[in-house]
Amino acid sequence: MKRFLFIFVFALLMAAHAQAQLIINEVLYDPSNTLLEGDANGDGVYSQTEDEFIEFVNTGNASLNLSGYQIWDDTLIGTLVYTIPAGTILPPQGALVVFGGGKPVGLFGGALVLADTGVSGLNLNNLGEVIAIKDSSGKTILTFNSDALSNNPNESYTRNPDLIGAFVQHTAINTFKYTPGRKVNGGSFITTPSKLITFKVDVNALTSLIDSVFVVGNFNQYCNTCNPLTDANKDGLWELTLPLASDTLTYKFAYKSVANYVQEQFTSVGICTKFEGASIYRFAIVKADSSLRNTCFESCAPCMNQLSLKGITDFITPAAGSSGKAIYLVANEAIPNLSIYGLGIANNGGGTDGQEYRFPNIAVPQNGQIILARDTTALATYMSSCWSKFTVILVDTIGVVNQNGDDAIELFRVGESVETFGDVNVDGSGEDWEYTGSWAYKNSAAKWMVGAVNCTDSSTTIFDTDCVFPICLGAKVSSIVVSGQNNDSTITQNAGTLQMIANVLPADAENKNVTWEVSNSAIATISNTGLLSAVANGTVIVKAISKDGSGIEGVRSITITGQSNSLSAQEIVGLQCFPNPVERTLFLDSPLAIDFYTLCTLQGAIIKSGKLALPQIDFSEIPAGVYLLDLKFKEQTFRRKVVKN
């Protein structure tokens, strides 16, 4: 340990301001090397050069601009050991502590704190050295002669009383070995610092494993590692609050990853940057305690939001209680760590409650569908088949998802609100965004839509309601392929049938129901379930038409042979039986007089028969099914297949 002989005989040569006076109140030139007794800068490391310090106090009643002031080792020809950074303003009765180096930790009584970045620190030697303090013009304003009162003290020398007394060893007054930035009794020179500035930077977009983050600026002489930030909750947002007097800040963020130290590099001046010398730095003007905007590393804007609100539910399910409450989100991009996001419920228009729920640390792929629910078992039952559309299912075990259908929902990223549904300051009852007993859903155009209030009341599943949750609705039909059962395209048996099949695409189509039609009912008829029944020899086109309003159709040609009709083609074409399928009355339109009719089952059992007073047959009492209708024309009989719905 180097030994210092350092007595201060200070002489004020000129005042930097008419009402401002700079003095030295305490100096530590010989830190103790016993364990951490000498760790004056509080960084957890003892260093002879880094823990030495000089404490200045502005005893005047006006602020003192110390920008460019210098500390000189003037023992021989003079050596500049430290220059106070630009923008350093010392308020009235305020203290400034200049350490020899290290990473000072603590508020130091609210004093301004600077640290030398040189190898030898402040170079506070003993043996008759004269230390000179020069102002920004280079004029010496204070000198100190080190020629007595040393005795290898292992502690500081401080004025007693503060500001006006002679220098004495610190332990001659109390048990403290030093009090940088504070009075000899540990109290502050000023009650509060001039400004508390909070720096924040989001490093989640970086691919490197971040060990530490720093802020480098004009308030710490652009020291690379003097002011480390912290990330206490491990969400990737690093923060640091510093007491600063300067109104104008120029700074950059930097991070260390293993052995690599990386500082922000800006290629052009933006809304938050400016040229400072040959480099581009962040720039801010602050007049009061401030929390600077959260920005992404190397950006003037926050990091991109990868997660979005997609839906909110307040279903009235058979399980009752909170079982129908959930929040639905979608990952717009792949999210390596979902825990940087959280949710908050603004109940009853009482304003934001901040982030109340934090997502777990899991990875979510792009387009991942996330649901956070109070009761996943009951909700899965209620949502039935569409529950499978969620790729990430989370249970809210702490009861945060307690919205009542009139509460606003906030999405947070690294603790800051990035998206809101509703108005946190408004009770949603009666508002156009109320979703009580219903749901809210953001469509593909990023517009919110809501179901009718209480539309899920008395329902067993969401499909029992008139307000099906949109995620449970599939796409429109894009194509229909028609085929016969077993891919048959013929009927060869007399009065035979063929079940027609409609393959509807896409698989998640909202409505796969179709309407069946045939091109010529004199050749074949078709039921509403797609059962094709042969009537006469020939070819018929079977058509399936989508019921979802898309207008999509599918067709298949079916050839019919082996039918026993002997009427002429003209007579066959002229006969019409309609409607077929029939509900109550089958009407007959024939160019020939009908003498007699017989209606029987496919197995030959006669259901009814007789002469017709009118060209119609009553089917109202006949059970649903497929029947054979024989119509007798003079000496010939013509058979038709009739379907009763």
Image (cartoon, helix red, strand yellow):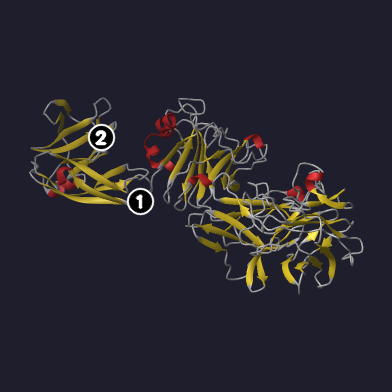
User: Residue 8: x percent and y percent?
Assistant: 83, 59
**Residue 60: numbered disc:** none
Front one among 157 and 341: 157
* Left-right relation of 180 to 618: right
Residue 590 visible, this orientation: no
Secondary structure of residue under mark 2 = strand
Residue 99 position (above or below residue 641): below
What residue is shown with label 2?
Answer: 586
Tell which residue pokes out farthest to the front in this image: 151
User: Residue 73: x percent and y percent?
Assistant: 75, 68
- Image quarter of the N terminus: bottom right
The quadrant holding residue 172 is top right
Label whose residue precedes the other's in the sequence (1 or 2): 1
Q: Residue at x 86, y 61 (%)?
A: 10
Q: In the image, what residue type sits under mark 1?
A: Gly
Mark 1: few/some/many CA within 10 Å (<14, 14-19, 20+): few
What residue is shown with label 1?
Answer: 551
